[in-house]
Amino acid sequence: RARNGGRNACCFFEPAWDEQFRRRHELAQDLRRAIAHEGQLRLLYQPLVSCETGEIEGFEALIRWRHPGRGEICPATFIPVANETGLIVELGEWVLETACRAAASWDKPLRVAVNISPIQFRHVDLVNLVSRCLGRHGLPASRLEVEVTEDVMIQDTGQARDVFRRLREVGVGIALDDFGTGYSGLSYLQAMTFDKLKIDRSFVARLGETADALMIVRAIIGLGHNLGLSIIAEGVETVEQLEILKGLGCDQVQGYLLGRPMQLDGSLELVSMRARSIIGGKGHEGIRG
Ligand code: C2E
Ligand code: MG
Ligand code: MG
Ligand code: MG
């Protein structure tokens, strides 16, 4: 009986497991094809705006995949598959290449921020890759910022420190993404050389709703500034959140209020004007209109 039950249980679970495996495998194959052929992948750019001046200081590059059969697939679905299959290496190269080429073509010398996955961070000679890419496009290193999450420091602190130091030497900026959601130890903040902390969207979303969120954000800004880091808040959607962040001395903001991830072609002036009018609070015409 027991053996029978065991077999039944096995039969019960197998199809679901199979199905899941098959889907992932299919997605991975499709992604491999998407990387090899032009047209399905593209980058959108979301403004990073100075709280003080209202000027756009850079853009974060965010990947999008339009699957021929399934339509838009969001990065939260396919980036994990890319990480598990190792495709992130090629995908990451494509992202870096595309972002640097775009930034080199902009009519203002703004920064481009590129997300680097922990797998890519560990398995690729990032410093070499970045240097060659900058060289190819004649983009000054100061115009590139890499965004990494706290997980890159968990496995091999020594390697992470080394990569950060070498990126710094090249002149590339380093931002710690989704700050406050990952590995909670803070000692690495001393050992590592970053430039910027990105306060995770989950804290920003609750600003103005809970006193806890306000205190956490205030503490992160204080901590960051004391360590000489610049602070950006992600996911700013309301004027209230913006005002609180400005009041707390946050350096930059990013979010739907200032601009959604967008296609940039040619002139940056239009997007710049919009961000300026929102930060400047000149009647807030950009927001309600
Ligand atoms: P992330 O790096 O933290 O990027 C910010 C995410 O927040 C983006 O989601 C962006 O569209 C979204 N966002 C920005 N402002 C707002 C807002 O005001 N409200 C809300 N609700 N969302 C906002 P997206 O583009 O779906 O990307 C999700 C994650 O996927 C990214 O989080 C990043 O971890 C990863 N990702 C995206 N592009 C790349 C890439 O090129 N390479 C790698 N390795 N990862 C990427
Ligand atoms: Mg990011
Ligand atoms: Mg982020
Ligand atoms: Mg985030």
Image: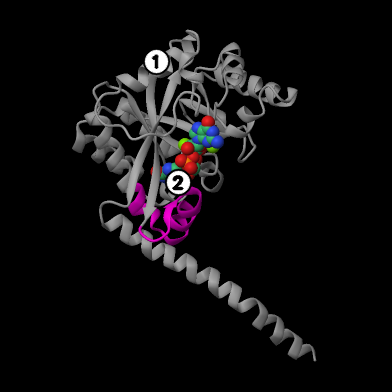
Is 16 inside the magenta-drawn segment?
no
In this view, 25 is above or below 259: below
Locate residue 168, reporting x and y percent.
Answer: 38, 29
Question: What secondary structure prevails in the magenta region?
Answer: helix
Question: Image quadrant for the N terminus?
Answer: bottom right
Say which residue label 1 marks. 55
Find out if the beta carbon at label 1 lies less than 8 Å from the nearest ligand 1 atom. no
Residue at left offset 37%, top offset 25%: 58
- Magenta span of residues: 68-92
In this view, 80 is above or below 4: above
Depth check: 280 or 143 in front?
Answer: 280
Is 90 inside the magenta-drawn segment?
yes
Locate residue 187, reporting x and y percent.
Answer: 61, 32
73 sits to left or right of 240 = left
Marker disc for residue 117: 2
Depth check: 16 or 270 in front?
Answer: 270
Type of amino acid under label 1: Glu
Say which of marks 2 and 1 sits in front: 1
235 sits to left or right of 111 = right
Type of amino acid under label 2: Ser
Residue at left offset 61%, top offset 78%: 14
- For mark 1, give the secondary structure: loop
Quadrant of residue 274 within the rendered picture:
top left
Residue at left offset 47%, top offset 59%: 84
